[in-house]
Image: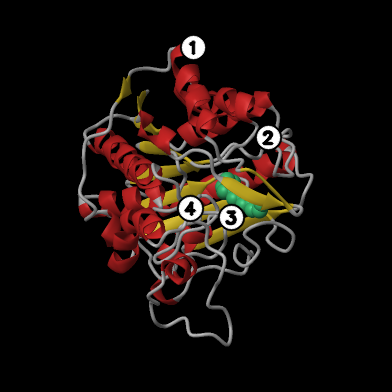
Amino acid sequence: MKSVYSERHKGHAGNVELVAGAIVPAFEMPSRAEFIRARIDEVGLGPVLSPAAHTLDAAKRVHRADFIDFLPEAYPRWKASGREGSAIPFTWPTRGLRGDKAPESIEALLGYYSFDAGATFVEGTWDAIKSSYEVALTAAGLVKDGERAAFALCRPPGHHAGSSFMGGYCFINNAAVAAQWFRDHGAGKVAILDVDYHHGNGTQEIFYERDDVLVVNLHGDPANEYPFFLGYADETGAGKGDGFNVNYPMPAGTGFDAWGAALEEGCRKVASYKPDVLLVSLGVDTFEKDPISAFKLKTEHYPLIGARIAKLGLPTLFVMEGGYAVAEIAVNAVGVLTGFEGA
Ligand code: OKP
Ligand code: ZN
């Protein structure tokens, strides 16, 4: 399987987050992608290509144009305003406040275009976001041109980013962009299977009223897990999208028996939808030792996930999302891919 990777992700470094009252290094860090990159060569998965340059047009097919245009401006404006350190959103226009109108201040704009404090900017962040987007589109091109499957080693991840907001380490929704790109380049129907531990709220929101993109999500129950405010089983789509969004929330402690059963059901939904192409939002934070997650999958299970997905027999684009047990995510993520290839 061919992979696409860019070292430009490395500039998105040194970010922090608030955990139990303390500012700590963000779990989403550059070494995640570096371990995966090295593992690809270790197992001989296949060639690793650099992404081709892309304009932002494809991003604006699923995101609001003003939101996309804000992203490259965010850090320069933060700096120009005399602020130092990373740009972190900290005020949100929630109930009772004016959320209908873009404010002027950079501090306010960060809140206006986000749903949490988890999407933070340093100097190199925009270039990393752009490279991650280009990685996804370049890998999508490989699948369109006839590869059975490809791996987009995206960093930063994307599935929490919605049509007009960032959050949860995500800025541009790489999988959603690629899904729309396939639609715009001849695919009649696209399915997205999101196996990251966290619900892909951004992906769900973007396609919620559409029947041409099926979204299936396996994740920690939002009653007790991030992103909390979306991801329940009764969210099945709206309008002509009714029936084309499927959520499998599962409790903390879920192991491969129950998780694999949900995967089986999800794969059957995908199969009966008969998509022209499948995207997998590949998070491996379902791993038992993931530091911020609560499922109990073991390393030996990841190749089984890949093998089950391969059984669908669809052209498949894997798009990297989460996974924070840094040393082990490489083995687990690439394990899914080798499992797919061996099936
Ligand atoms: C991104 B992906 C605050 C906790 C916030 C955010 C988790 C984002 C996960 N310290 N946690 O889905 O893997
Ligand atoms: Zn996750």
For disc 1, the marked residue is 42
- Between marks 4 and 3, how big is the CA–CA gap? 33 Å
Q: Residues within 10 Å of mark 1 (few under 14, many from 20)?
A: few
* Marks 3 & 2, CB-CB < 8 Å contact: no
Q: Where is residue 269? Give x, y as percent.
A: 51, 52
Question: Of the residues under marks 2 and 1, which one precedes in the sequence?
Answer: 1
Residue 199 circle label: 3
Question: Of the residues under marks 2 and 4, which one precedes in the sequence?
Answer: 4
Q: Residue at x 63, y 64 (%)?
A: 233
- Amino acid tagged 2: Phe
Q: Nearer the viewer, residue 252 or 186?
A: 252
Q: Is mark 2 within 8 Å of ligand 2?
A: no
Q: Nearer the viewer, mark 1 or mark 4?
A: 4
Q: Relative to 228, does residue 319 appear above or below in the rendering? A: above
Residue 287 circle label: 2
- Between marks 2 and 4, how big is the CA–CA gap? 36 Å
Give the quadrant of residue 132. top left
- Between marks 2 and 1, how big is the CA–CA gap? 21 Å
Q: Residue at x 34, y 54 (%)?
A: 76
For disc 4, the marked residue is 84
- Amino acid tagged 3: His
Q: Where is residue 191? Give x, y as percent.
A: 41, 51
Disc 3 secondary structure class: loop
Q: Is residue 219 visible?
A: no
Q: Nearer the viewer, mark 4 or mark 3?
A: 4
Q: Relative to 106, does residue 182 appear above or below in the rendering? A: above
